[in-house]
Amino acid sequence: MLKTFFYSFLIYWKGTDKLYDYIIIGAGVIGSNIARELCRYQTKVLVLDKENDVANVQSLANSAIVHSGHNPEPGSLKARLSVWGNLLYEQMEEELGIPLLKTGAYVVAHNHHEEQELDKLAELARINQVPEFSILNYEEALLDEPNLSKTVTKVLSLPTTKVTYPWEVAFAAMENAIKNGVEFRKNALVTKIRKVGNVFYVTVNNNQEYQSKYLINAAGVASDDIAGMIEKKVPYTIKGRKGEYFVLDKRVKGFVNHVLYPLPTELGKGVLITPQFHGEILLGPNSLEVKDKYHPTTSYEGLTYVKENAALLADNIPINQIIRSFAGIRSTSDYDDFYIKESLEVKGFYHLGGIDSPGLTACFAIAKYLVEEVMNVGEIYSIDPNFDPLRKKKVLFNRLSLTEKKDLLLKEPLYGNIICKCEKITEKEILDAMHGPLGSNTIKGIKKRTRAGAGLCQGGYCEEKIIKMIAKEFNISPLEIAYDKEETKLFVAETKVKP
Amino acid sequence: MIKEIVVIGGGASGLAAAIAAKKKNKDVLLIEREAELGGILNQCIHNGFGLEVFKEEYTGPEYAYKFIEEFNSLDIEYLLNATVIKLDKVDDIFIITLSSEKLGLSEIKAKAVVISSGCYERTRGQITMPGDRPRGVITAGSAQRYLNINGFLVGKKVFILGSGDIGLIMARRMHLEGAEVLGVAEIMPYSNGLNRNIVQCLNDFDIPLYLSHTVTNVESDEFKRLKAITIQEVDSRFNPIKGTEKHFSVDTLLLSIGLIPDITLLDDFDIDVDPKTKSAKINQAYETTVNGLFICGNSLQVHDLVDNVSKESSRAGTSAADYIDGLVTSRQKIKIIPKENILYVAPQYLDFGWSFKELIISFRSSKKLEKAAIKIYQGEKLVYQKRRTFIVPAEMEQVSFPYSELSKDEDLRVELEEL
């Protein structure tokens, strides 16, 4: 008896003897893309994330903008990787089916002083080699942006600014990585790291250990804490700045067509108005340093600040169409730039520290930069001839033409059954989100994959239907279904009388 | 093939509209997106329905069943599990695009359309409620559906924001199901629910009602589950008053903070929308500013009694039949304008092309009035007045009077004079 117990404990503890080439901590847009870039070589890669899904912290809640690269300090990594990253989005739209809305952006000035600042910003854009930018006067800008605030005097037009759908960036990269052999483990909180000889031993949830030759810290907000597990002196500290936002329902589509920026300040790019890929519009973010970086919350003051500042960009914002507010966290560090380097203390340990804005913009470039220029993976591992960079674009049924819809319905009648009435998401799309290499059985996971529940009624109508679908597909009781983490069960009890 | 009348939605409203139109010998098709008729009534297992229509007290499903029985006896054509995803009008014909597993995408043509698509619940996102975004903040209607239809309880320590009827009903329901209901907060200085619900759902179970209070903070635990809320008293401008904070440890916050007519199907139409009802403006025939497009029930205005939904929708169904019969002549109309102490009126237009004898106006007051006179003016002329006692915003009022004597040139003004 005792022997059996000891034996099973041993197996439980030891986990796997497998030696990975790379372990990546963090499955946001950065970690997922690094995993995919490593697939170009004959490597064994494991990705660990403490959350129950990819893209669940910084990648979850942000402005979704692919910036042109106009404002980082020339010569910085941020400048180089954001301009490069912006270009890569066009390629990834093809390769990975990344959603892209080519909006362009206006940075606005309201008076003589701001116009001078705008000219300085245009000069930065020039040095950073931002393509196609120009200065427009108010009347010129108004032609494409009829609701532009009447207080605006001049704008810097940045046509290469785009909007993406951050969750899909992470899904696409991770799905493709998994297809190319990467292993992904969610709900894996790293609790201990040690290096013995040339091997990293990474303990997760205090009870399981993984081994690798190299260790990549893409843990975002937690990156300094992760580094602190193995470095005596971590070269940066994550301060954590929260950003609060409002979401306007997609019925306001067209209220603004460009991303509207105020002039940037030391705190960041300021409160923006951002049209989103699926038609809704974001107001925000503010930028406030928070005590608890794992715990960004919305506040009256913050949300009021967002409303007031958004009003400097456009007139008559339809705030009666607000359907949601949220707060996201930026992993801002005390280092001025992205910190993408090998550890000075521990060989083979790589930092991706302080990846705040423009991290989403730069994510594809960051992954390439790390793999090719920092880690020089090509010198260690040979190229994998079987690497397949392609991932099929997700079907967004409601966006198809009538003919396309009818064709698809002949093959798949379940595209006819609308589950989410606000966003018009069909049963087939939800089934697809449950299965596949990165399938999900949580309400939030399905919302992120399909947008079911992201619209006007915020899931009031479809959540019940999705619960039934999950119960059926995974053959579990609704009592076992969670919103996100395992602990966030939807129900506490079955009622006395069953219908 | 062109249908005469298509009714969109098969709840209390759609059933009554379809029955009324069919009784006028019209070719009617009703479209319902759920697997069964009855709409939200199916989850309202409490009693109190039918006192006005049937002079008897029924539960929601019983009330629905009475109508479904009549609907079936009239052999009215209907589709289930079919969602209307688009509504257009080309010349005088409506084109209804349907999506369903069975039929795929299909188009149905109709001469007239009745929208009876109900309403949806206001969510947390539509009000400013600062704090964390944990699991456990849920609309009262959703919790009701989970409990009464699916058989699952969403939480065991519950607070309720908003004193709308669903919130009150759910306070009692969750209490009876073994949950601890710690209180109900209402931002207004008066309840938004029917008085009988305050008495029967809160007072009878010693559940406290905090008037002029709202939730000002939401806290989650490490797993993003609701852990606690803070409520605060608000001043006359609804700003929280410092020092009035009360904390409650809860696992569930139910929201009963209002219902909004679901008129997303009208998005493609250039119709007049009333910012107060958040629905289409109508004339006395329940016709929107698009000829032949009718709207009724909770998709027109949120009702507190289903009996009124049925009566109203029955009239809308009859109007749609009259429209098909070509009984509408001129299109000369005047406005009906809410004034002193009136939150909104419906209809918002009086169209002299329709030959009804009586004008029925529904309205809600904008504040609580102990004694008041309802007065309707045309220019300087008082055309209707009636005294009422105890008028509250939570209860929809109705007046009706003949309008053949009215001038066709001057707008009507509806007032509530405090006595």
Image (cartoon, rainbow, N blue to C red):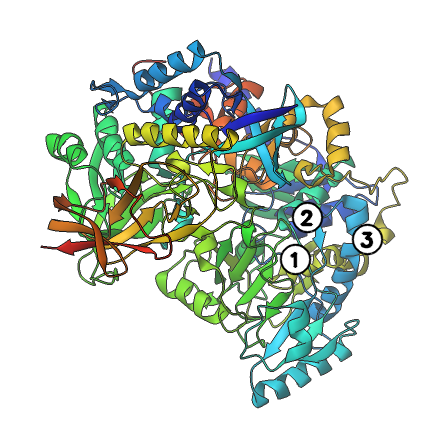
In the rendered image of this protein, does residue A315 appear above or below residue B189?
A: below
> Callout 1, which amino acid?
Leu
Structural distance between the alpha carbons of marks 1 and 2: 9 Å
Same chain, marks 3 and 2? yes
Q: What residue do we see at 58% from left, 55% from top?
A: A220
Question: Disc number at residue A226?
Answer: none
Q: What is the quadrant of the N terminus of chain B in the image?
A: top right
In the depicted view, which residue is nearer to us: B126 or A366? B126
- Calculate the distance from the C-alpha at mark 3 to the C-alpha at mark 2: 13 Å
In the orientation shown, which residue stands out farthest toward the right? A385
Instruction: Residue under label 1, please give it.
Output: A360
Q: Residue at x 88, y 37 (%)?
A: A386
**Secondary element at image label 2:** helix
Quadrant of res B98 = top right
Q: Secondary structure at mark 3?
A: helix
Report the side of A427 relative to B278 (left or right). right
How many marks can you see? 3
- Near-viewer residue (A408 or A124): A408
Q: Is residue A371 visible?
A: no
Q: Are marks 1 and 2 in contact (CB under 8 Å)?
A: yes
Label 3: few (<14), some (14–19) or many (≥20) C-alpha neighbours in 10 Å: few
Question: How far from the left and from the top, in percent, is residue A425?
Answer: 60, 35
In the image, taking residue B387 as reference, residue A62 lies left or right, namely right
Marks 3/2 in contact by CB < 8 Å: the verdict is no
Question: Which chain does the numbered disc 2 sit on?
Answer: A
Left or right of A8 on screen, residue A161: right
The residue pinned by badge 2 equals A169
- Tell me whether circle 3 and circle 1 mark residues in contact (CB < 8 Å): no
* Residue A91 numbered mark, or none: 3
